[in-house]
Image (cartoon, coloured by chain):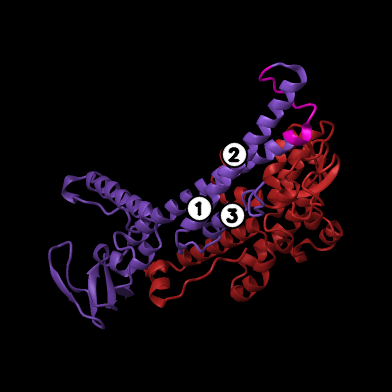
Chain colours: A red, B purple
Amino acid sequence: MCDYYDKDAILATTEACPVNLTHGLAAVGRYVDPCASANDLPPNTRVEVPFWIVPTLAARALANVGTPRAVYGHGLSADIGADPGCVDLRARSPYFYELAMKVSGEKARQDDTQTLADDPLMKLARLAFQGRYRDLLVKALSGNCEQDKAVRTLPSLTSEERELFESAREAARVYEQWRNTEEPRLRASRTVTNVTRGTRKRSRGA
Amino acid sequence: MAADVRAFARTATELYRDVALAEKHHLPPHDHDRLKRAIEEVKYHSEEAQNLLKAQEQEQDDANGELGSQDWTSNPASAAAVLVHYESILRNKRLMLAYVHERCQKIKAFRWRLGNAVPKEIVDRMAPEEVHFATQYNRILSEYMTGAGVDDRLGNIDLTLDATLPPKEPYVKVLVKRDIGEFVTEEGKTVHLIPGSMHLLRRCDAEPLIVQGVLEHEGYA
């Protein structure tokens, strides 16, 4: 598996995904989903489990994959149809696109008649990305008040979009530097400055 | 069954999240306790799965008198439970390996950015094994750099210097921030680096000290 150590692949698969347990589940019900009604679950029970359990169960026809409503429901398609740039995707899931791809991949594998491209979840994710990508680049590359714009834009971006945003800004910075033909000033490493200032920056926020 | 709601890789997920979401330049302290707890959980999952397998075998032996047959079609709910335990073990393994891997990457990055002078605060956050890894990595990198000189006259090359672009100026103007006493340059001259004084140093001499925060870069000559 090429993404075994990949940070985004690992964290995206911790997101919850609803499944329909076609044959039930013995003894471990409440452990996989704390909201389940009992530990022994009868056939055709709906539970929410972390996504990493899903592929094994789905491959053996022990579970049917559903769409995570908390992420992709609640009028999301209407919001995205109106203005994709304004939707706070991060609040829904920091791994919005990755999860959509994984869930529709599982669905397509279970149902031969449906191709990946036809999946409504896939269409929704593509529509969202198309609409947001241009917006994102414009905001990342517009020069002067970039700090201000970044502060306002960043909180609603998924982690993949953040990466794009930051690479765009870095590219713009380096280009500017090259155009002004100034040599970069050498600086102390952030690790040293963090330690000497005694500031231990906390994690970037989940 | 031990009622441990923290099972199903939740501990390992927290463990991994800690280091994965930390800032790029920050190394969180090595979380030995959580790591140990995650290993305990793996043992618990393994035992539970074994119990389920044994119970199933027993049942089948009683039913048809055949030894060692494994047919789960009559009992899919237990089969699902075994799979859940099995996946939990694999997931724990992946998270723990990724945790170790991520930390090693960070430690390597420190060596490239800071040279030999990794601050004590960072070293304190490492596990003994990680300190060992750091010294060994340091050793092979130095060995490689000693051997990598294209030209014998160049001698040792410091590959960790930021040499993505050829510098326009060989000399840089620096302000001394911290007292490290006498400093011997590559040309063999001795410079007294007293805090507050300005010097014109060769870039290759100054760069590691600037990165370590001893000197501040004021401009080019």
Label 2 packing within 10 angstroms: few (<14), some (14-19), many (20+): some
Residue occupying the point 37% across, 60% down: B113
Instruction: Tell me which label, 1 or 3, sits earlier in the chain.
Output: 3
Which residue is the site of mark 2? B46
- Do residues under tags 2 and 1 come within 8 Å of each other at their CB atoms? no
Of the pair A68 and A108, the residue shown nearer to us = A68
A65 up-or-down from B158: above or below:
above
Using the image as rendered, state which of residue A173 and residue A186 is in the foreground.
Answer: A186
Q: Earlier in the sequence, mark 3 or mark 2?
A: 3
> Which one is closest to the eye, mark 3 or mark 2?
2
Q: Amino acid at mark 2?
A: Ser
Q: Secondary structure at mark 3?
A: helix
* B157 with respect to A167 (left or right): left
The residue beneath circle 1 is B35
Closer-to-camera residue (B140/B132): B132
Q: Which residues are magenta?
A: B67-79
Residue A71 in magenta stretch: no
Our reading of the magenta stretch's main secondary structure is loop
Q: Residue at x 73, y 33 (%)?
A: B79
Q: What percent of the width, then of the height, locates residue A121?
A: 80, 48
Q: Chain of mark 2?
A: B
Name the residue at 48% across, 58% down.
B31
Q: Locate the N terminus of chain A and report the quarter of the image it occupies.
A: top right
